Amino acid sequence: MLKEKIRSEYGIRVHRKQTIHAVTAVVLIGILISSGMIVFIGWRNRLGNERKDLTRLWEEGSFEEVFEISMARLETKPMDYFLLTLHGFSAYQLAVAQINSYDTQTYIDACIWSLRKALLCKEGPGDLRVHYVLGKAYYYKGAAYADMAVTFLEAARTGNYPAGDLPEYLGLAYAAIQDYRNSVAAFSLALDPGVEDRAESGEVTQNRAPSDLLLLSIARSYLALEEADTARAYLIRCVETSRDSNILVAARLLLGEIYGKSGDVSGAEAQYLAILEEGGENAEAHFQLGELYAGGGDSTRARAEWRRAVRIDPTHGPARTRLNM
């Protein structure tokens, strides 16, 4: 009887210990779950606040702050799509605001690095803004990267991304790779008065007037296609609307070349003289006047113009060559 009593009491103690252990384990698990939930909720709230803060800074136009903060956060979250896109977008905005070309290229490189990485993090086509900004970034990277600009700008266009300057950049990129047919086709979209222009601020405007640079670029593409009459029409329109002295000079030089090749010597002379009257001395205008006079048999006036060209620009090779003949 005594042994049975001892065995019974021992069993009760063991059972009691097991019960206590089980309750303790349940309590500990509950505490761990609660703590985990608190940590998760806190992390989620902090993440949400971080995104809200960065979005607010972006909307305020504080691109440098967005760039710096996103770069710091990417050190701990290197594959975060939101951070990568904002870092890339802010880098592009800073790039186009630079005066120094080295600084521009530094930000362009940061933009391309960040947005290409963002594309790796996103399944499917992703945000069309990424393709659009990447295309523009590659265009600013230089002519050697124009094919990449075409690739990403075409992706944005195919997805119907509503940016009014997209066809213009696409036309310039196609021209840079000497695909002038597609360049003209893209430029024609840029001239479409029905195209909506969604600025990067999110505002939408319509019926953008074509820029003088766009008109000049279209004319150059048509000249490359040997469609001089169409090129001349765009150049005349450019001259009539532009207030930029450099664009005016470029347009008048091309017009003078078109008139000269068609045999309209007086028309060509008028363009070169207009350059000198409107913008002062210009070596190329003097050189081309010399070419016109030489073609007409007036070598005295021709050499005088070539000498003026060399006096303005001692490195003007064609004028020096003419004088040494």
Image (tube, rainbow, N blue to C red):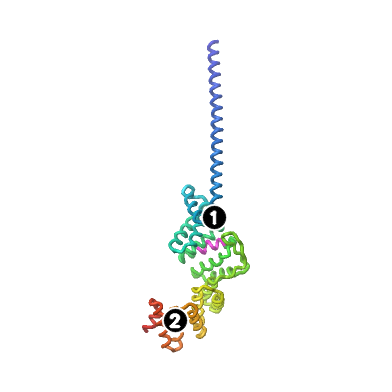
Mark 1 or mark 2: name the one nearer the start of the chain.
Answer: 1
Give whichever of 304, 255 is nearer the camera.
304
Q: As drawn, which residue projects farthest toward the left?
A: 324
Q: Please, what is the three-letter code of the amino acid marked with disc 2?
A: His
Quadrant showing the N terminus: top right
Q: Which residues are magenta?
A: 149-156
Q: As drawn, which residue projects farthest toward the bottom?
A: 297
Give whichever of 82, 249 is nearer the camera.
249
* Residue that numbered label 2 is attached to: 286
Residue 92 magenta-highlighted: no
The disc label shown at residue 58, or none: 1
Q: Secondary structure at mark 1?
A: helix
Contact between labelled residues 2 and 1, with CB atoms less than 8 Å apart: no
Residue 155 magenta-highlighted: yes
Occupied quadrant, residue 194:
bottom right
Q: As drawn, which residue projects farthest toward the top?
A: 1
Q: Position of residue 77 (x, y in %)?
A: 49, 48
Q: Secondary structure at mark 2?
A: helix
